[in-house]
Structures are given as structure tokens and as C-alpha cells.
Image (spheres, grey):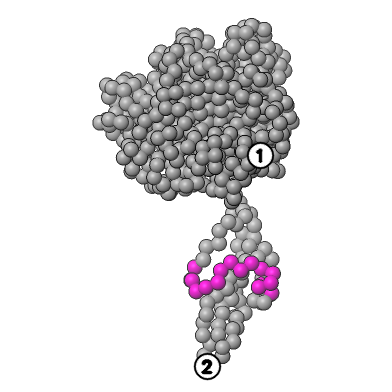
Amino acid sequence: MAAVFQGVELYQSLQDLSTRDRAWCDTNATLIYSGTLEAFDDTGLTGSTQYYYKIFAKYLDDLITTYSSGVMISKTTEEVTFGEYELLADIIVSNTTSNVDITGLNIDKDDHILLVVSAVNGASPESLLLRWFVNGNYTQTDYWTQRISADGNVVSSVVANSTVLLTDMGYHPTSMANARIKLTNSGNVVVQSETLRGIGQSTVLLYDSHGSSIFTVSAITMLTIRSDFTNGIGAGSRFQLYRTGGA
Amino acid sequence: MLGYELVEDIIVSANTDRVDFSNIAITEDDDLILVCEVVSGVVSIREILLYVNDDDVQSNYFRQSINAKSTVIASDRANYSSIGLVYPGKMCVLRANVKLTATGKLVALSQATVNAGSSDILINNYGMAHSPSTSPIISLSVRTDVGVNAIGIGSRLQLYKRVAEVIADITVASNTTKVDISGLTIGKTNEYRLISDILANDYINIGLHPNDDFSNNFYRQELNANGAVISANRFNSTQISYGFPNQRSFAISDIKLTNSGFFICISNGIYQYTLPSSMYLSKLYTTSTNAMTSINKLSIVAELSSGIKAGSRFQLIKLK
């Protein structure tokens, strides 16, 4: 009586299976498919890893299940690469200062930039402000900013003919901002900033600002963070600038 | 390769009714960022809308907004798919996080700078949800509420997809109080993002705790919009989201260890987006009151026992 084909069994292993029979595989390898399909996709694999596969045909021969000697193949998966933000600048202020310049930039209209600010209050005035400027244009009236804040149960907003990154810093020792910077297709610079003032304190408040230049540029070559009081940027302040690819 | 890679970049060459991103295949595993600079093509104010898979039935969408115009703050909930607003002759620059949730519903969190480049600048923040499940996303369409050629020449729309590493992707198998993500090494040079899609079993607060610190060493300031009602408050706790009974909440939380070692979490979210006619939009900003050198573990904790229901999903992404 002729043997009757029943299907196949496909085993996967990280060990070489070339000399292994079906009984060994059944104990030591992973059965990943059993059936009669002609194609099977193995998913969830680890990158840069060599996998061994051995397939056995299954027969009924005089009502006894038998297996072929099997065929093995091996393949190494491709290396998995992940993207991450590109660090353009990481400045830790060692001495109290009034300005931090990030120079040598070439930010164009295709880019998306994130500026992460950990600011230490370097001066005493409660109304201490940090402002952002592009390409050395420090004319306040060339920028507009809309702000919204929540301080306890008080919500307020204001518009100003200037740039603002962090405001009223003098009330707290440290503040933080995530500022997303975009050079628009029309050449205006737009900054959307999410801010916490009063880091580490019970009086923390949130402060969001959206600012824009009313002049246009073809590229951002320099960013300046400037305090409006002398030496308002304290030692230990940190400015991390990233190219994000959208985020 | 950056944290997000470009899917499509469209610069509008003539005034148009719509800009479409087609031939895309976006699943619940993906997350997108849509950046739009919409220049007005008409003489009246228009809402900028986002449609998924050609579903242009407005009643299938809800949005909740928080807006600031000079000293006036307002909020609004409407049966619209809004992600921005464009004034006549002006430009709106918006950045929207777009996500297909664990149950296949499109949600978007958008921050729009309206009238960018002018003295009329104002802020519009939106949370938007699509009611039907629709997976995968095969098309996204940006239009306006009354649409004849409202998207002007020179508008630019860029769609990005995350390629940054997912450090943890946890779908909760059974109701739980706490979800731990261990084995982390988050330092002061890192940037992480947590995407939370939470099915809650009650009215709960959901906090994010670093390094097994479940004390009250945290403060948060929040800003909430519920329809036309805006409220704010400060609490002695950490929080990334609110939960509502048997409804889902969606939040994006940017996590940072400052140079002085404080844990910071900036969360933006929509709550009960599965009941979008009652959807909230909130901002929850948390700081620790103690400094640390690194974050080795993050725990997502419900205020009530078993408050996080099976099917909730948390994705932790390393952006840097």
C-alpha cells in the first residue's frame, strides 16, 4: 500500500539542525507550523540573529506515521535599526550669564526642531524672562507671542509683541520648557512651547506659549536664549537642541 | 534616521478643497505626527478638519478645544473633526499627534498656532476622536468645514511616522492597579514618550511614578476643558490621565529628567474618547519634588484597585 501524504512539520531553532532528525527536533526545537500549506511566514524574529529551519514531510505508511529525513535552511535576519533625535547642541551653563547662543545651525524648512530647556534662575527679579531670538534679530517688535497659563485654579492668557520662552522665572529656582521650533514654508519661525515653572516645588504651574516671527528667513543659523535681566540664566541651566523628524 | 520619518510632504500648488495622504497603511502599532502650515485660500474663517479613510460624515467625529486669544480663554466641544483654524489671508501652523488606538479608533491631539507670522497670533489646542473603528488607516484627508479652495497655494502638509524604538509595549491582560516598566536607564540626556490608551473601570486618577516612589513627592498643575467649561487645579500627586467608568482615555506624556535631576512629565490627553460627546481635553504637568540621578523603572498606577482594565495599552518610546 502506497504511503499517503499527511502534511509537513516545520521546526525552528537557533542551533544547526542539519544532522538532527524529526524526533530530536520535536524535543529540542520549536514547532512553528504543522499542516498542508505551501507557504508560511515566521514573524516576531530578533534582528541580526541566525535562525535554522527544518521541514519534515509526514506520511501514513501502512497506517503508521512516518517522517522524511527533512530539509534544512538557515538565514540571518537583518539588523534592526531605530531612529532617534539628532542632538544638535547640548549646552550646560557653567557660569551665570545673560545669553546663550547656539551657533553654526543650518535649520531649513524641512526640519523640525525641539529645544529642551532646564533653566536655573540666575537673578532675583520676579519678572525675569527668558526669550528666544533667531539669527541675531533681537528686535522685540519683530515677534509676537500668545500665552496661556494655569496657576492653581487661575487660568489666564495674554498676547505680547515679543518672544517669550519662560516668564516670571524669579518666583521659582528652576523651570523647564519643551519648545518645538519650525521654519515654515513661508519663512516665518514658529515656536510652540510647553513649560513648567517651579520645578520640584509645590507651586508648580503650567505655561504654554506660541510665538512667531513676523519677518522671514531662509534658514535658522543661530538661536539665542536671552534673559531680560543681567545674568538671569543661572549656572546649571541646560539647553538641548534636537532635530526630531516631526515630533 | 530621526525619531520620526517622513511619509509624505505635500506643498499645495493651487488653492484646493482637500489634501490627501493616500496609499498609507497605518495600524494600531504606529503613531503619526501631522504638521500643517495652512494658508487661507478664502475670505472667511475656516476650521481645518482631518478625515480618516474618506469618512467625511461630521457626526462621526467630536472635538474638544481650548483656545486663547489675547486675554480671552474659551473652550468648546462640537461634532467636528477639527485640528486647526485658519483666518482669511493668514496662516495656521499646527502639529498633531495622530494615533489609531487599541480599539481601532482614530484620535488626534493638535496644537495650533493660528495667525502665525502676524500680530493676531492665538493658540488653539484640540483633542479629536473618530467614533467608528477603522483599521487600518489607508487614507487621511485634510479639508476645511466649508471647503471650496479654502486650502491656499503655498500650504505645506507633512506626515511623519515613528521609527524610534518602542522600549515597552504592554497590553493589559487582566484588570490591574499597576503596570510596571522595568530595566530602564533614562538619564538627563534622554527623551522618552509614553503613549497611554487606558480603559478604566471607574472614575480614577492615573499616575506615573518613577523608581518605585509611590509617595506624595510629586506636584502637578492641570488645565481641563469640558465643553465650554475650563478649569485648572494643582494637586500633590503625579498624574498622566483621568479615567472614566468603562470608557477609554488617551494620553501622550513626554518624560524628562532635568539637569537638576527632577522627574518631569508633560501629558496631553483626551478622556472618555469612546463617549466623545462628553470628551474632555486636558493638560497635566507633573514635577517630582525630589531629585534623582536616573529613572530605572516607571509604574503606571491607578488610584483605585484594579482601576486599569484589560485591553489598556501602554507604549514607551525612546526618542533619544
Q: In which quarter of the image is residue A202?
A: top right
The quarter in which the C terminus of chain B is drawn is top right
SS category of the residue bearing label 1: strand
The quarter in which the N terminus of chain B is drawn is top right
The structure residue drawn at horizontal position 32% and vertical position 37%, both measured from the top left corner, is B58
Which of B215 and A43 lies nearest the eye of the viewer?
A: B215
Which of A85 and B306 lies nearest the eye of the viewer?
A: B306
Magenta residues (range):
A24-39
* Residue B272, percent from left and from top: 47, 37
Identify which amino acid the numbered label 2 is placed on: Met
User: Looking at the image, is B4 positioned above or below residue A155?
Assistant: below
Residue B299 is labelled as 1
Residue B42 is labelled as none
Identify which amino acid the numbered label 1 is placed on: Ser
Q: On the image, numbered disc 2 is attached to which residue?
A: A1
Which of A122 and A152 lies nearest the eye of the viewer?
A: A152
Q: How crowded is mark 1: few (under 14 residues within 10 Å), some or many (20 or more)?
A: some
Q: Is residue B43 left or right of residue B191?
A: left
* Residue B46, percent from left and from top: 32, 26
Q: In this view, does B49 lie to the left or right of B185?
A: left
Residues tagged 1 and 2 counted as in contact (Cβ below 8 A): no
* Residue B125, percent from left and from top: 45, 26
